[in-house]
Image (cartoon, rainbow, N blue to C red):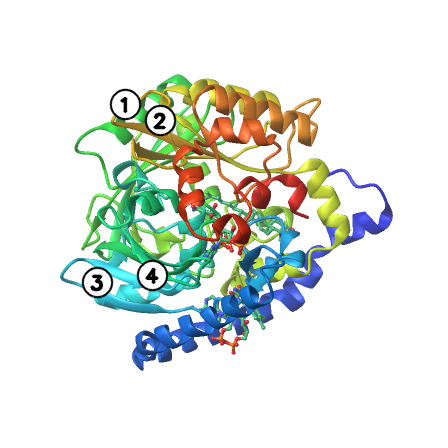
Amino acid sequence: MQTDSLLEFLLVEYRWVVVVTCLLPLSLLWKVWSTVRNYVVFKMNSAPKNHDKKVKEIQKQIRKWRMSGCQTKLCTARPGWQTMSFRQSLYKKSYTNIDINLVDVLEVDTENMTVRCEPMATMGQVSLTLQPLGLALAIVPELEQLTVGGLVMGTGVETSSHRRGLFQHVCTQYELLLPDNSVVTCSETENPDLFYAVPWSYGTLGFLLSATIKVIPAKKYVRLEYHPYTSLPELSRRFTHEASRPDSHMFVEALLYSRHEGVLMTGDMVDEVGADGKYNPIGKWYSEWFFTQVEKHLKRFQKGDKKTAVEYIPLRDYYHRHTRSLFWELQDIIPFGNHPLFRLTFGWLMPPEVSLLKLTQPAAVARLYERSHVIQDMLVPVEHLEDAVQKFHEEFEVYPVWLCPFKLPNQPGQLQLKSGKESEMFVDIGVYGVPKAKGYETVSSTRRVEEFVISRGGFQMLYADTYTTREEFRQMFSHSLYDRVRETLPGCLDAFPEIYDKVNRNVRK
Ligand SMILES: Cc1cc2nc3c(=O)[nH]c(=O)nc-3n(C[C@H](O)[C@H](O)[C@H](O)COP(=O)(O)OP(=O)(O)OC[C@H]3O[C@@H](n4cnc5c(N)ncnc54)[C@H](O)[C@@H]3O)c2cc1C
Ligand SMILES: NC(=O)C1=CN([C@@H]2O[C@H](COP(=O)(O)OP(=O)(O)OC[C@H]3O[C@@H](n4cnc5c(N)ncnc54)[C@H](OP(=O)(O)O)[C@@H]3O)[C@@H](O)[C@H]2O)C=CC1
Ligand SMILES: CC(C)=CCC[C@@H](C)[C@H]1CC[C@@]2(C)C3=C(CC[C@]12C)[C@@]1(C)CC[C@H](O)C(C)(C)[C@@H]1CC3
């Protein structure tokens, strides 16, 4: 990473000093506190009773805002440092912040196979609550601090999305507080326009009070197969086949380690460790970061070992396989984080809470990331996978690249299929790291990739920086249903800005 001054150099190269000595112990404190708190609250079954009381607390805040003449727009009071995105939203300073202190799992319905969660419940919390019941969310987005509210109002994807779609496609009902202070529920059959406009609305239609999400039976392990490739066309063909086949494996994912080479992984939930593979508890504190373990399969393949490797991984370890290394982002913060000695001594404290990393990010680091760090997830139809990888290589040249397939059904809402088909297989292309492409420049390079994605009928995940203009944004995301719903919801236009006003690069720091 290039740095300008000695101070910048120290703050970047030695950021690990603060992270290892302060943030790791603090993160452990936070993890222990929140796990115990969630367990006690769930066990005491206090949450469902408290839910209506807490909703009244929120309605009190909205009433106060309305009594004061709706002077400002509204947003949640979730501090920017706690959100699972690189930036902190500037609008939180001028909007009326509404405290949504709804942090719990409300009830698990084993008959209808759903769980009702409050919006501030996190993926780690929900998967811990469901695990003893032998259940899991139908889609478990990777990072533990992701919240239900953020995944509904933004989006969520995981390696079973080729079967089940995005996070919104496994939600059956939303409970919302509208700007006129009314509480409504919506689903495919009840207020369907609102139901389909909520995903990707980024909190600009109302406040989410709870979401009902599909759950599935969870088995103890994932049987994972590793298929290395040294040809992108072959990897792309097999990736598309594995994602689209009617009898697909439950999990499909690929990591690219260069423009032409990568490892495709296919997996299924199983109850026992089989004799055809080795048991690999990748979640153990001492175990190697997952993406470097996967790369070893590519290296052995390049040396002539062509066999398909099989491993048995504990289910929870699999769901959060990239969490301990924050995909591959921690290597830029704790460069020796994957060293065996460090893992043995400090591995049990990893990863540092993203929230604390954000809270303590030096300005010099922010400037450096601004200039020479890419964090983007672009969603394109899988037929364009090869030319998309080519485009990302030309503009960014960042590896590994995360490839995660997902099925996109043709439903009303912001994500419209340009092909008009009933459903289409897409791929999430995740790029996180220091760009090596010659001539890389943050805005112009990213805008060229955005233009490419729009031209292929794709979408940009909006936790990342979008440099699109308002017009380009409306080209990428359909606003016809969204605009209509905003006009029909009483007080919505006064209470909330448009999506673009909450996600574009100029409203984030
Ligand atoms: C070291 C440290 C790290 C922290 N990291 C995070 C973090 O990564 N994510 C985060 O949301 N908050 C984080 N917080 C803030 C923390 O959640 C609470 O705001 C603080 O601990 C006070 O909680 P409380 O006693 O008011 O609990 P509560 O009254 O239960 O919660 C108050 C607020 O705390 C947050 N909160 C509490 N429990 C949860 C939960 N299970 N899931 C999500 N949010 C919850 C919510 O913002 C909620 O509005 C952190 C705090 C500390 C000290
Ligand atoms: N595997 C995956 O899919 C991953 C996804 N992500 C991204 O992370 C995001 C989620 O991060 P997270 O920190 O949980 O969410 P955030 O706190 O960042 O919230 C995301 C958006 O949702 C809105 N929102 C959140 N809760 C509510 C609510 N109760 N009512 C109304 N609006 C709400 C926020 O509005 P406001 O600004 O007013 O608070 C914000 O606009 C996802 O959208 C996704 O893009 C990141 C990593 C992995
Ligand atoms: C769809 C999927 C799987 C997305 C994965 C997104 C992750 C790679 C993102 C989400 C939050 C994220 C942007 C973050 C960072 C890295 C990439 C993350 C983890 C870091 C930790 C990079 C270092 C920065 O100093 C800072 C701490 C601000 C951020 C925090 C958010």
Q: Nearer the viewer, residue 293 or 373?
A: 373
Which mark is nearer the camera, 4 or 2? 2
Write down the residue under mark 4. 127
Q: Nearer the viewer, residue 189 or 506?
A: 189
Q: Nearer the viewer, residue 382 or 349?
A: 382
User: At 24% across and 55% down in the image, what residue appears?
Assistant: 215
Residue 402 has which mark?
none
Q: Are marks 1 and 2 in contact (CB under 8 Å)?
A: yes
User: At 44% across and 54% down in the image, what residue appears?
Assistant: 206
Write down the residue under mark 1. 421
Q: Quadrant of the N terminus?
A: top right
Task: Inspect the image, locate mark 4, and give the three-letter code of the amino acid beneath it.
Answer: Ser
Asked which quadrant contains residue 177, the reply is bottom left
| Mark 4 and mark 2: Cα distance apart in space | 31 Å
Which mark is nearer the camera, 3 or 1? 1
Earlier sequence position, callout 3 versus callout 4: 4
Asked which quadrant contains residue 180, the reply is bottom left
User: At 59% across and 70% down in the image, what residue appears?
Assistant: 25
Write down the residue under mark 2. 417
Earlier sequence position, callout 4 versus callout 2: 4
Asked if one can make out residue 200 in the rendered structure from this viewpoint, the answer is no
Label 1 environment density (alpha carbons within 10 Å; few <14, some 14–19, many ≥20) = few
Write down the residue under mark 3. 134
| Mark 3 and mark 1: Cα distance apart in space | 36 Å
